Image (spheres, grey):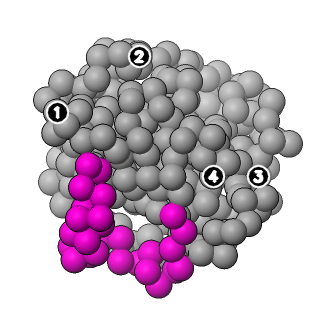
Amino acid sequence: MEPLNTLQEFTSLTPLNHDLFDEKEIQVWMKRDDLNHPTIQGNKLHKLKYNLAAAKQQGKESLLTFGGAYSNHIAATAAAGKSFGFKTIGFIRGDELENQPDKWSPTLKEAHNNGMQLHFLNRMDYRQKTRAHFLQQLQQQFPDSYILPEGGTNELALQGFEELSQQLAMQCPDWTHLYCAVGTGGTLAGLVKFSASFTDQPRHLLGVATLKQASYLIPTIEQLCGIHHNQKGVTQWQLLQDYCGQGYGKENTDIHTARIWFEDLFEIPLDPVYTNKMIYGFLEELAADKIPPGAKVILYHSGGLQGRLPEMQT
Ligand SMILES: Cc1ncc(COP(=O)(O)O)c(C=O)c1O
């Protein structure tokens, strides 16, 4: 399957220089996928591109998906629908928001403005989102819809990370470590799956969990990428669970400080839910000497900047 070819996505690998990195004898770059598309940003572009092509090929008229009030995936799906001629339908967690549009997050308002039809589910019903029976019912109710899971993670989403892995291999053939943020695990799984295709040299992929008690994601990621965590081989990956602070969407003082330090120093904006924790995790690992001298480290900027609150926008 070909991805939709109007999607521009070759982004820079920006070197980051700092005395701290020199002292530890490592080299660091940031992959600027926050710049890969104006509205379908970061990892979302990779996850959606083959799914959009599949939806077109199947003659579907709508994209139907699930997410919370601050979901970047909801925003990206709404934007993709608008750009590529699909109607969009979003099932949102939390029915308390149904009749209170003034309390909608900027993400929900943007999705709505991009034409997404919003349906609000109470938390119990929302948990059905992966059940086969529930999905069959939805498919019957919305027969013209292409259904995407929460966070957009599925087999076709993973495929989208092949080109990204190829770009990284071209831009820095001997990179050794890559840090990325983890929500559902699709991004990490995609990068793990394809990073070995372009090298014989060991690569370490470190996914920083953004939610608490994330170990339940490990079997899912293993299944998606086909590589056991902590397996010794060309590609090794781990889910780092110590850098999520108080949990999903919560930025404690240490994480906030790391984000502001990074943003001020390198003039690269981060988001307050995902990439802030990725940077915090990387800095903590560096301080604890978990990254060996000689390492060539890539920090993956997965976007999410539309989720920044208006007062945080620069
Ligand atoms: C900006 C950003 N970075 C990282 C992630 C995590 O990606 P994944 O769900 O594939 O683990 C997300 C997930 O929605 C995201 O919006």
In magenta stretch: residue 133: yes
Residue type at tag 1:
Gln
Q: Which mark is first along the chain, 2 or 1?
A: 2
- Between tags 1 and 2, which lies in front? 1
Q: Which mark is first along the chain, 4 or 2?
A: 2
Name the residue rendered at 39%, 30% in the picture.
85
| Residue occupied by mark 4 | 108
Q: Is residue 284 above or below residue 262?
A: below
Q: What is the distance, in whole Å, between disc 2 and disc 3 at their CAs?
A: 32 Å
| Residue occupied by mark 1 | 57
Question: Residue 310: horizontal and vertical position, in percent?
Answer: 80, 42
- Between tags 2 and 4, which lies in front? 4
Query: Mark 2: few, some, or many residues within 10 Å (few <14, many ≥20)?
Result: few
Query: Mark 3: few, some, or many residues within 10 Å (few <14, many ≥20)?
Result: some
Dot 4 falls on a residue whose secondary structure is helix
Q: What is the distance, in whole Å, between disc 4 and disc 3 at their CAs?
A: 24 Å
Question: Residue 257: horizontal and vertical position, in percent?
Answer: 79, 49
